[in-house]
């Protein structure tokens, strides 16, 4: 009887416990200010109860209706800086005088619990997370990046005006930054040109399902 040749690395299929399901995703959605990412994230979380949101930290004051630990972790500048110095953030940045950051533990703890994690960050934060993920296998394996943008700057300007939260000069600053951010779309895994809320959600759900079926995240079938 001929002995069986050992399998090569490319022939091996990882076997994980039955019913363990595919590996969890870290779904990162970025967009220019007013691009609709908050609405898309809310819709996605409602459509996928198995997905949890990563709560980021900020030094800006809460807006009406926002809650600490639910919408953001609201920190004073001194506490935020203390965590920066401790290396607690996987990314952090200052935008328009306010600091924002994502705690490394916020992502890893939820991924290790088997939860899909949704992360809403700006383009600068997304670039840092992509870079950090190269050195952290858990994050690299889980990360999926999506850039959401309106079809034109004119549409974005109209959305910012309708939001009625910023002064005209602030809107102009945001539009200037948006032009720079939109130019970075090629660095993301997916480009989603915003249409209607239902259509944006449909395409986002398709992205999540496709990523769940990737070979690297699949559970081996039982024979």
Image (cartoon, rainbow, N blue to C red):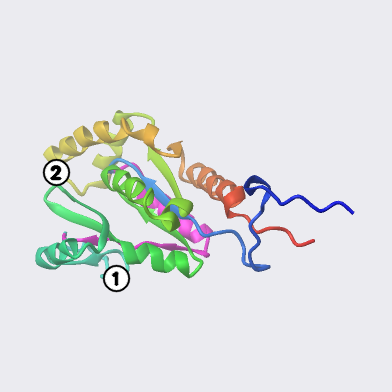
Where, quadrant-wise, is the C terminus in this rendering? bottom right
Whether 209 is among the magenta residues is: no
Where, quadrant-wise, is the N terminus in this rendering? bottom right
Of callouts 1 and 2, the N-terminal one: 1
Splitting the image into 4 quarters, where does residue 107 fall? Answer: bottom left
Furthest residue toward right? 1
Identify the residue under disc 2: 167
Residue drawn at 36 percent across, 51 percent down: 135
Which residue is at the front of the view, 18 or 185? 18
Distance from disc 1 to disc 2, alpha carbons, whole Å, reads: 28 Å
Callout 2: helix, strand or loop? loop
| Residue 150 visible from this viewpoint | no
Residue drawn at 66 percent across, 61 percent down: 15
Identify the residue under disc 1: 69
Residue 38: percent from left, percent from top:
36, 52
Q: Is residue 105 above or below residue 34?
A: below
Residue 2: percent from left, percent from top:
86, 51
Residue drawn at 50 percent across, 46 percent down: 204
Callout 1: helix, strand or loop? loop
Viewer-nearest of labels 1 and 2?
Answer: 1
Q: Which residues are magenta?
A: 34-59
| Residue 107 visible from this viewpoint | yes
């Amino acid at each position: 009887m001929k002995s069986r040749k050992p399998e090569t690395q490319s022939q091996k299929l990882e076997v994980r416990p039955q019913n363990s399901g595919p590996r969890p995703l870290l779904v990162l959605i970025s967009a220019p200010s007013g691009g609709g990412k908050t609405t898309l994230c809310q819709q996605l979380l409602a459509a996928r109860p198995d997905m949890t949101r990563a709560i980021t930290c900020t030094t800006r004051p809460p807006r009406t209706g926002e809650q600490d630990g639910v919408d953001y972790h609201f920190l004073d500048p001194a506490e935020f800086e203390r965590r920066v110095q401790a290396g607690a953030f996987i990314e952090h940045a200052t935008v328009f005088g306010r600091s924002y950051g994502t705690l490394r533990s916020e992502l890893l703890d939820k991924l290790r619990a088997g939860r899909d994690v949704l992360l809403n960050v700006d383009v600068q934060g997304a670039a840092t997370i992509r870079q950090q993920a190269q050195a952290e296998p858990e994050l690299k394996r889980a990360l999926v990046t999506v850039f959401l943008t309106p079809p034109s700057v004119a549409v974005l300007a109209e959305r910012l005006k309708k939001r009625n939260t910023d002064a005209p000069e602030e809107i102009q600053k945001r539009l200037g930054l948006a032009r720079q951010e939109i130019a970075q779309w090629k660095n993301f895994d997916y480009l989603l040109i915003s249409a209607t809320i239902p259509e944006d959600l449909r395409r986002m759900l398709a992205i999540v399902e496709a990523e769940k079926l990737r070979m690297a995240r699949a559970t081996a079938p039982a024979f």
